[in-house]
Amino acid sequence: MLVNFLVTLTALFLFSGLALEGGMLELRKLQLQHAADAAALGAIYERGRGLSDWVTAGKADAALNGFTDGTNGVTIKIQSPPVSGSYAGDSTAIQVTVSQTYHLTFMSLVGGATATPTSGAVARPSTTPNCIFLMGSGSSYYPLLNTGVGYISSVCNIYVNSTTRSIEDDAGSPLTVTSPDSILLAGSPNTASYTDLVETPAATIHYYVTTKSDPLASLSAPASPTSLSQCTFRGYAAFSSTTLNPGTYCGGMSLLGGTITLNPGLYIVTGGMLWSGVTVQGTGVTIYLTSGPSPTYSNGTFTMFRCGVYMSAPTSTSNGGYTGVLVYADRNWSTDGSQGLQILASYIVSDGIWYALNTGIYNYASTLTATNYLGIVTNNISNSNGTFTAPSPNYSSLSGGSPLNTTTVESIVQ
């Protein structure tokens, strides 16, 4: 009896030890992965800065994560181009492999004296222009929510600044990206949820991208009206075809029938806008949504319902508008996670940037596209049965080129 007990106790002790050692092995692999990611990012950042000693920089970042090459059985290999995986032969990419050989206690009793767990990472830059920036916090919502049968098709980068949540795609039709580098996430793979994702061709999803500031932060805001005497119109409404001129429209702008032509220039609108059952056209137009005069007219929703909109932003500042900016929402209008721009059952062709940094865009059963370029800088996009189509951007008509920050982004891709 005692012998059987001792044999059973020994077996239980051995199995417990094996389980513990197996768990520690998995933990070591996770730690190695963090080191590999850090090394790949460190190396690609340094090479992007034009420094030649990027291998040393990568190994230094791995050391900061607890793994020093040549110490305690650690081996770190950093090379470009990668020799395996999806980016083999890509001279813009850097591949890192981190391994560690160490002695096993319990597993040695069943034939394995040592283990060499290994993890790897690949980092590369994206030079594709950025044209859709989702800048919201993602604290209780996805900055990009795609539902129904809608889709988003972009030939330039979609950048998500949140490290908490990024993309929720559960559409009947897929979230579609059509360039080699398309989705840039400040967060980890865990921040995205793809139920239905199609990439044509296979897009690169960049994780752990350095968070960005507002790409239009240098854009000064127009002066909001502070007294009624500064209002060109108060509570303006049009029910039939007409032509409008730039000015300050206090208390809203309601366009409710016919074809409305907006002459070139800057339209400052307080109290929101309602466009319903109307065709709106205009060249060289910037619409600034704001509040004032205080306390009469607050910020208000910009709603387009069953409209056809054919507009373009100014190509210069000659008429008082903002080069390349079609819609500009006051930065003080903060509705984090909500949508102040509502596009409902409408068709919109607009060469220009929709700038709504602190409020979002809701697209229901509508099409938003462009001929030459479509830029979006917003808190979030909620897309239900609608389509966004961002073409390969052509900013040649704009003085100074693209107003958006299109700098290279380095990130983990594998």
Image (cartoon, rainbow, N blue to C red):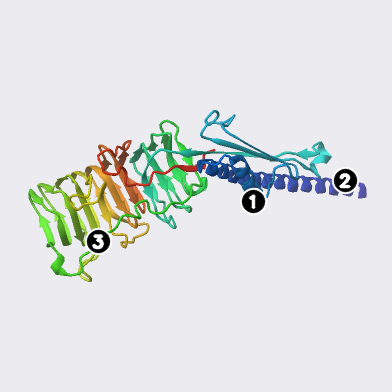
Mark 3 surroundings: few (<14), some (14-19) or many (≥20) residues within 10 A? many
Most foreground residue, 221 or 279: 221
Instruction: Answer with the quarter of the image where residue 335 lies.
Output: bottom left
What's under tag 2, amino acid-wise? Val
The reply to whether residue 174 is visible in this rendering is no
Sequence-first disc among 2 and 3 = 2
Q: Nearer the viewer, residue 193 or 354?
A: 354
Q: How far apart, in angstroms, are the residues tagged by discs 2 and 3?
A: 80 Å
Q: Determine the secondary structure under disc 1.
A: helix
Circle 2 SS class: helix
Side of 7 where 257 appears, left or right: left
Q: Is residue 104 left or right of residue 348?
A: right
Quarter of the image where one finds residue 108: top right
In the picture, the disc for residue 290 is 3
Residue at 53%, 35% in the rendered image? 93
Image coordinates for residue 401, horizontal then vertical, percent: 30, 42
Q: Earlier in the sequence, mark 1 or mark 2?
A: 2
Q: Which residue is mark 2?
A: 7
Q: Nearer the observer, disc 2 or disc 3? A: 3
In the rendered structure, the answer to whether residue 169 lies left or right of residue 313 reads right
Image spot of residue 391 (x, y percent): 31, 36
